Amino acid sequence: MEPIKKLLHGQNFSEFNTKKEELESLQKVLSDSLEKKFKGRVLAKNILNDVFFVEAMNSAVASQLKMTDSQLIEKINDTHQIETKIKKIKINVAIQHLSNPKRNIRNIPASANESLRHLKAEMSDSPLKNIINGLFKPKK
């Protein structure tokens, strides 16, 4: 583990380390300037051309943050922790891709199974019959 740490603190990764430290300081300034309800829901991304890029976890947080962006700009500029003065805040909404949660499979009562089997036997070929056939196929 030590050789990896030495490699990361070496000259090759100094650019990445400075960028990481810059982002951490931006996040600290942002979290110090935000209200309690926004902390943990907003990430500082970057400052380019006097525009502070911020990422909100959802659109509700983004819209509330947008309403208070002028006060936030004043608070951040008053701290003097950032060399450049911020003129504008651009808020992006983070898109979260939730994996499809597995549905709980309920056991179908035996009487319902029997009714479906009887209905399937009486039906002519149709899309509904194909769906009912799919219910009785063994799961892989």
Image (cartoon, helix red, strand yellow):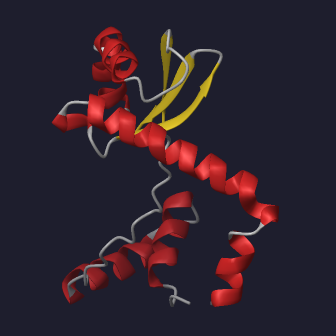
| Residue at 74% over, 51% down | 15
Report whether 89 appears left or right of 118.
right
Whole-percent x, y for residue 32 in the image: 28, 35
Q: Quadrant of residue 140?
A: bottom right
Name the residue nearer the viewer: 79 or 62: 79
Quadrant containing the N terminus in the rendered view: bottom right
Report whether 114 appears left or right of 2.
left
Name the residue nearer the viewer: 106 or 2: 2
Rendered view: 71 above or below 21 = above
Q: Quadrant of residue 64?
A: top left
Name the residue nearer the viewer: 22 or 54: 22
Rendered view: 71 above or below 130 = above
| Residue at 59% over, 51% down | 20
Rendered view: 58 above or below 138 = above
| Residue at 46% over, 42% down | 25
Q: Quadrant of residue 127?
A: bottom right
Whole-percent x, y for residue 8 in the image: 70, 71
Whole-percent x, y for residue 118 in the image: 35, 80
Whole-percent x, y for residue 4 in the image: 69, 82
